[in-house]
Image: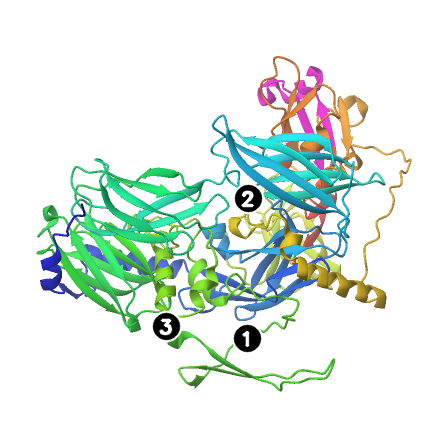
Amino acid sequence: MKFRSPFTALLLSGAILFTAFKINDDPFSLILKKMEAYVQTHPQEKVHLHLDKPYYAIGDDIWFKAYVINTQEGAPSLLSKSLYVELLNESDAIKYQLKLPLWGGVTWGDFKLPDTLTEGNYRIRAYTQWMKNVGPEFIFDKTIKVGNGWANKVFTRATYVFSIENEVQKVDTRLKFSDKEGKPYVDQEVSYQVQLEDKTVEKGKTKTDVNGEVNFAFLNKDNQLKKPGKITANLTLPDKRKVTKIIPVTETSKEIDVQFFPEGGNMVFGLPGKVGIKATAKNGLGKDVSGNIIDQTGQVVTNFKSTYLGMGFFVLNPQPGQSYTAVVEMVDGSEKRIPLPAAQAQGYQLAVQSSDPTKFNIKVLLSPELLRLGELKLVVQHQGKAHVVARIKTDKQIALLDIPREDLPSGIIQFTLFDQANQPVAERLAFQKHIGDEINLQIKSKQDYKPREKVSLDVLAEANFKALQGSFSVSVTNTSIVNPDLENESHIFSTLLLSSDLPGYIEKPNHYSLDNSSITLQRLDNLLLTQGWRRFLWKNVIDEVIPSIKYQPEKSLSVSGTLLTEGGKPISGGKVTLVSSIGVFLSLDTLSDANGKFVFDDLIFRDSTKFVVQGRNEKGKKHTQLKMDPIPGLVVTPNKNTGDIAINVNEAIASYVKQSESYFDELTKRGSLQRTIQLQEVNIDKTVSLTKNTANYNGTGPTAYDALITGKDLQTCHLLSQCLSGKVSGIIIKNGQAYLTRKDARDPMAIILDGVHQDFKSMDNISPINVESIEVLKSPHLQSIYGLRSNGGNGILIITSKRGVQSTYSTYTPGLVTYTAKG
């Protein structure tokens, strides 16, 4: 049995009941004024990187051009003058960072991929300091595959088989190790460690079989650990060298997550409305599903079927006293029952139909109990600017209105319905695409060229048949080697108008800009019906929640800090001198303010310029200390683009890796490209203080610790926990944390990094390559100086980082520091 809508007659006779809204001093006008002030005081920036290729190989250059846009103006941003672009590896570690000058919102640069890098799923992030105020969700963050055939001695291939063992997810894993010619590494030692969300769930040692394979299984005992993880495998080569490989774990089961999203926000009894479907695998990729909706008696009410990437919708008219369940038919033939969101006893429905290319069709439904209680308001806004505001009468249960598209800019449009108390009660996102906003590019060149002949292009840019002036970029690739991936490549349209305003992973974002067909537009509407949330929140405006502004737009390069006494008190009116003779020649003086602050602004210098900063107090005495202001980086979050992660990268882009290997070999023969030469390890016998930079309160030397691990001991470790495992007696490693083996030691050992107590859930957050030494304190007399309250007597790890890694400046004498700035 299917329910009929009680609104059939009303749909035919319902009038368009709304009036133009005039700004005055009523409470709702004040909300709009708050929104206007909010947007003006908190302008936002977006970044798009035009990359030259969809994937790369070791030896390549990643060329890019960057466009930074002011969202309120829809034009190149003049807020920031510097852009940060980072290349991150699979361990979410920043390998390279560029700080680039912005000219009118535009800049460009490149990353070289040396043969010291390994293959993997790398990430490129781009942001300004100002963008850090809204967090990492809205920055440019793209995953790219980087293969390695040219400098690679070990090729891996991973396969996973999923099952359930005693109601626990089980993953049978097979890793194959072979050389460049495909010859397996037979009877070689392999150690492995499996981590899910930085929690170690399995580790072991084994040997490869005749096929170069190792087999093992791991269990995901914690149902919450369903996010991506990794396997760290160490293979010992015949020459006894160890090679570390990182293999992604993108999912731990074939389970599909199915969610339902009522249009407008809620289902309401007696009000028919759309319900969006979104079905995804654990790796983030959409999976198409179908099934039925049943009521609490088991009767089928309607059916559903996703249409693209696991997304779709159905219409449901929930009835009072009924609850509803989705019976989802899975790929393996099994069924999964998922309760639908509970319907409200009374409320509002906001429906937006976007199939008409000239207008948005709006339908507002309300429960009988809410009739004639006062006017509703509908606000149609884009990037925080209200373009349409309408009053809707409530003398009938339904109101219809049309919003002309020509009045709205391109991008995500936010429709918000406010009740009589001026509270948002329903909301819907839709997409507006102005054909006239698109630039038509005509590129002319001759068809045939001789080898190494210069290519000339004539480019004509037009919009609405009018010539345009602007900044453009072009990438030139060989399509016989690089296959264009139109749905996944970095695209200015999908970045600036779609993904930069929607948090979360969007699969194939460029698909929605390839054409303007009705099918594509419906798929785009399903995305906005089911995808996450958005950048602008009405609640912040109404409650006058002022965002925390920690970072100001960088207008120029600067060097700043605080001048202090040796006791740590600020010095007012002290003289500070900035001198540099390497990279840039300058000598500048300034005075510290009442808080000891000083700044040298409006500077121009290249990257990694070295400065000497000298401070004197108001009497010219040098007994001062200088504390330089660091430029904090953006926190590195786990990769959100889980669906773009390839388990076997070299295999995924095998054709390109093979072609690039031949190309780089030819360049090497010509002397145009250099390979890194790996030198044999040489032990130098030199008596030095192994703990010269330590922050250990017990001093330096053998009496200050129970055990010492030096940076040399860490060279073959990829994870810090691996370095400690089995090397220090009386210590056991569990889930990336160290514990004393004595019975009364229940808590992990305390970690002190460069003199600062840390609260790590895993010591693997520290990269071994950055560690100079680890001092292990097990004895009570060595721990007592720290106080039992601070560590419970459970042991302490004193970790000292390599100088220059943890800090960008070093103190040599009182009142004098050397400082390396990012230029």
Which residue occupies the foreground of this view, 186 or 515?
A: 186
Image height check: is 457 above or below 143? below
Marks counted in the figure total: 3
Q: Residue furthest bottom?
A: 446
Residue 705 within the segment the image draws in magenta:
no
Q: Nearer the viewer, mark 3 or mark 2?
A: 2
Find the distance from the CA under tag 1 to the CA under tag 3. Answer: 20 Å
Q: Residue at x 62, y 37 (%)?
A: 173
Q: Which SS class for mark 1?
A: loop
Distance from label 2 to label 1 (Cα)?
Answer: 37 Å
Observer able to see residue 621: no
Position of residue 69 in the picture relative to residue 435 (left or right): right
The label number, if any, that marks residue 718 in the structure image: none
Snapshot quadrant of residue 637? top right
User: Which segment did they paint magenta?
Assistant: 774-803
The spot of residue 689 in percent (x, y) is 83, 32
Give the residue number, with chain letter if any, for mark 1: 472
Picture coordinates of residue 503 (x, y %)?
A: 44, 52
Q: Quadrant of the N terminus?
A: top left
Q: Say which residue label 3 marks.
A: 434
Q: Amino acid at mark 1?
A: Phe
> Percent x, y for residue 626?
66, 46
The residue carrying mark 2 is: 250
